[in-house]
Image (cartoon, helix red, strand yellow):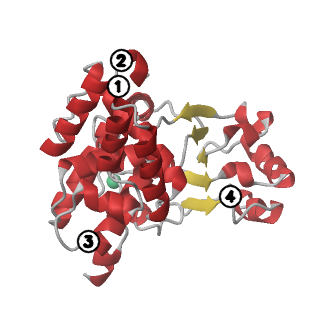
Amino acid sequence: MQTTRHLASSRRFRPQKFSEIVGQAAVVTTLRNAIVRGMTAHAYIFSGIHGTGKTTLARIIAKALNCTALSGDGEPCNMCSSCREIAQGESLDVIEIDGASNRGIDDIRAITETLPYNSGKSRYKIIIIDEVHMLTKEAFNALLKSLEEPPAHVKFFFATTEPLKIPATILSRCQRFDLERIKDSDIARKLKFIADDLGRPIDDAALDFLAVLAEGSLRSAESMLDQLFAYEKDSVSIEKIQKLLGYPTSDLFFSLDEAYHQSKAASAFLIADTVFMQGVHIPFFLEGLIGHFRTAVKLSLSLSTHTSLPQHLRDGYQKALSIYTPEKLF
Ligand SMILES: [Zn+2]
C-alpha cells in the first residue's frame, strides 16, 4: 500500500489501454486500426511536447502487438502474461531506454546486437527509445543499419520533443505522428478523475486553472496536482493554488481593471509595487495578466461561460467586460 500511495499520479494513473489515453484521438484511432488490420510499420516516431503521452502510447502499442488475447477493436487485454510483464517493465522483449542518458554508440549496439533474438514468448521484439534526438551521430548511424534492414519481428518506437534534431535518414524510415498539446478541458477532466479517486476535494475552477497553467502537458498538470495535495490538507480552491505557486490572485487583476477604468495611473503603480513587495515571481505576474485578459476575451466572445468559476470571479469578469471594449481586450 505504501508504494501505491507515494507513486506520482502521472505513473499511478497512467493509461493502460487506448481508450484511456487523454486527447490524441486521431493518432490513436489510426494506430489502433493498423493493429487490428495487422498493418503496423516497423518504426514509429512520436513527437510532441513533454507530458503528452508519447511513451505511454508506445507501451500500449507494445502490449497490443504482443497480447495473446487482443480485443476485436485492438485493445490489449492487460491480463495475459505478456501484457502484465510489459506493464511492470519486466518483459524481456520490450526494451525501453532513455536516449538522453544512453546516447552513445555502445548503448545502441547493446540493443541492436540482440535484435535477431527474442525470448520466444512474444511475437515482437519492441525497442522504445525516449528523447531519441539526444543520440550521438555515431549512435544514429548504428541505429540506421537496423532500420534499413529490420528483422520482421522487430518494432521501433522513438519519442522526441525535438524532431528537427533527428537525422533525415532516420526520419524517412519511420512513420511519424505528432502528438498535440492536450486540451485544457481534457486535462481538467483527468485531474478531476484523479482527485475523486484519491478522495481529495478540489474546486472545478481550481482544476481549470491548473489545466491552463499546464499548457497542454498532462504530466505537468498531474505533478502540480500532486504538489498541491501534498501541501494542502483541506479543499483546494483557485486562490490557494495561486498563493501556493506564487501566482498573483485574480483580485489584483480586477483592481488593475478598475485603475484603468478610472484612468488612475497612480493606482496601477501602487498595484505594481504591491506585486513586487509581495515577492510575486514577475514572469508569473505577466502570465497571470495574459491569462486574465484571455479569460475576459473568451467570455466576451461567448467562447466560454466559465461556469466553473466561483461567483466572485464571475462578477469580477462581468465588471471587466463592462470596462473594456472588445477591441481593447484584444
Ligand atoms: Zn494481453
Q: Neighbour class for label 2 at 10 Å: few (<14), some, many (≥20)? A: few
Q: Which residue is mark 2?
A: 326
* Comes first in the chain, label 4 or label 2: 4
Contact flag, marks 3 and 2 (Cβ < 8 Å): no
Task: Give whichever of 77, 290 is nearer the camera.
Answer: 290
Q: As shown in the figure, which amino acid type bears the numbered disc 1?
A: Val
Q: Position of residue 83 (x, y in %)?
A: 37, 58
Contact flag, marks 4 and 2 (Cβ < 8 Å): no
Q: Position of residue 260 (x, y in %)?
A: 38, 33
Disc 3 CB within 8 Å of nearest ligand 1 atom: no
Which of the 4 image quarters holds residue 238? bottom left
Ligand 1 rendered quadrant: bottom left
- In the rendered image, the vertical position of residue 62 relative to residue 185, given as above or below: below
Q: Position of residue 48 (x, y in %)?
A: 55, 40
**How much space separates mark 3 and mark 4, taking CA atoms?**
36 Å
Determine whether the residue tagged by mark 1 lies in a helix, strand or loop.
helix
Contact flag, marks 3 and 4 (Cβ < 8 Å): no
**How much space separates mark 1 and mark 3, taking CA atoms?**
32 Å
The quarter of the image holding the C terminus is: top left
